[in-house]
Amino acid sequence: MFDSSSMNISASGLNANQLWMNVISNNIANANTTRTPQGGPYRREIVNFAPSSQPTSFQTVLGQTIGSQDGGVQVSSISQDTSPLKLVYDPTNPDAVNGYVQMPNVDISTEMVDMVTASRAYEANATAFDAGKQMEMTALSLGR
């Protein structure tokens, strides 16, 4: 009876943005990590988003329109940023080679911008979820 696909779409956005926020937190936490278990300094991780279902045919689009399939977003992958590592002169660091240490490619200002973006997207999905819930509550009260 109830079409909760809008709430499912918002929930997928909440989950995806929560994971993005976790990855950003991990990047910030490892901004000064010069030695990882894999060897070498920490490399920044990037979250890649994709639609959770991609319409490929008329029947698929029609199925989505009548509510048999949900839309939304999903995290397709988490990849490492291949940008160059920073070299910092620090001869006291135990990982220094000829006085220079390879530091992670994490830029705190970039992470802060991504964090604000993820936070705003999370808030927007929470607001959309709440609006969908209010609409269904109104529909329930009309049926009484």
Image (cartoon, rainbow, N blue to C red):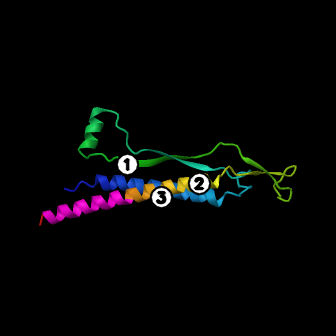
* Secondary structure of the residue carrying numbered label 1: loop
In the drawing, does residue 37 fall left or right of residue 8?
Answer: right
Contact flag, marks 1 and 3 (Cβ < 8 Å): no
Q: Earlier in the sequence, mark 3 or mark 2?
A: 2
The image quadrant of residue 8 is: bottom left
In the drawing, does residue 45 fall left or right of residue 90?
Answer: left
Q: What is the tally of numbered marks visible in this picture?
A: 3
Give percent across and percent down for residue 47. 53, 48
Q: Residue at x 81, y 55 (%)?
A: 95
Residue closest to the far top:
57
Residue tagged 2: 111
Using the image as rendered, state which of residue 14 and residue 70 is in the foreground. 14
Q: Residue at x 19, y 56 (%)?
A: 1
Disc 1 to disc 3, how far (Cα)?
17 Å
Q: Label 2 crowding class (10 Å Cα cut-off): few <14, some 14-19, many 20+? A: some
Disc 3 to disc 2, how far (Cα)?
12 Å
Q: Label 3 crowding class (10 Å Cα cut-off): few <14, some 14-19, many 20+? A: some
Amino acid type at mark 2: Glu
Residue tagged 3: 119
Which residues make up the magenta segment? 126-142
Task: Mark 1 vs mark 3: give the one in front.
Answer: 3
Amino acid type at mark 1: Gly
Disc 1 to disc 2, how far (Cα)?
24 Å
* Secondary structure of the residue carrying numbered label 2: helix
Amino acid type at mark 3: Ser
Give percent across and percent down for residue 11. 37, 56
- Screen quadrant of the C terminus: bottom left
Q: Label 1 crowding class (10 Å Cα cut-off): few <14, some 14-19, many 20+? A: many
Residue tagged 1: 72
